[in-house]
Amino acid sequence: MSKLSNALTMMQLLSNKRKYSVKELAEILEVSERMIRIYKQDLEKAGIYIDAIKGPYGGYILSHNFFLPARGFSKYDILLLKSSYELLKENQDFLFNKEYQQLIDKVSGIYKSTKKKAGSVILKEGDNKYKYNILSKAIKEEKKVWINFLSLDKKAKERIVHPCDLFIYNNEWYVSAFCELRSEIRHFCFTRIIELKLLEESYKI
């Protein structure tokens, strides 16, 4: 397959939200691990950002839904249409004055609608996206995290953890982390995490 086909195939694999190691992707696509890293760079240049998780549990994961950039109309396109229309009106043989004006109105309407829809997503402290961003940052920077979570008996408990992996199980996000209190890896469901805070203290895997 071509470089573009391989990059799109890699994007399709990652879109199922599963974490793949670089080695796994290289074996599936039958290319070198270096090429997998190049595909990642190329996809990110196109606005499709892939998270790279470090350590023995590391790999690539596409954490958020993505949309290919939509082609819309710009203010320049509308000005160009209007300028062209003024020139065409001077030609007495031009028979599509009404239709051309309707076209300008349609394009202007699409442009205005696109501007209204545009906007950034606001992350709230209770949202899974917010939790993902904090934990992903902790994994990348090897930082400890303080969490306040609900145990199975519905009691709030505090822990200092070393996040090492993020994954989805039964449509729920989880973080695998070394718990300092229990001295072992535990899996915490995002929906049970009430609060979390990225700490300055580092850890080593």
Image (cartoon, rainbow, N blue to C red):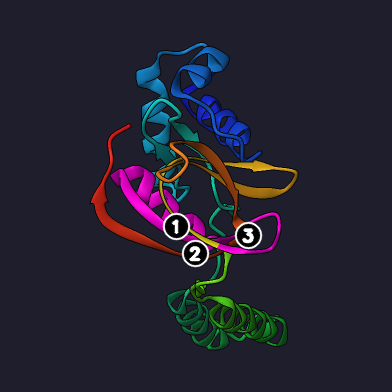
Where residue 200 is drawn, which disc sits there? none
Where residue 130 is drawn, which disc sits there? 2
Mark before the other along the chain sequence, 1 or 3 = 1
Residue type for callout 2: Tyr
Q: Tell me: residue 70, above or below residue 33.
A: below
Q: Tell me: residue 128, above or below residue 123.
A: above
State the residue position of label 3.
Answer: 192
Chain part drawn in magenta: 128-156
Say which residue appears at 63% left-offset and 78% top-offset.
110
Say which residue appears at 48% left-offset and 47% top-offset.
48
Q: In which quarter of the image is residue 99?
A: bottom right
Q: Tell me: residue 174, above or below residue 1.
A: below
Q: Image quadrant for the C terminus?
A: top left
Residue type for callout 3: Arg
Work out how far the residue at label 2 is from the one at label 3, CA to CA, in angstroms: 14 Å
User: In front: mark 1 or mark 3?
Assistant: 3
Secondary structure of the residue carrying tag 1 is helix
In this rendering, position of residue 136 left or right of residue 114: left
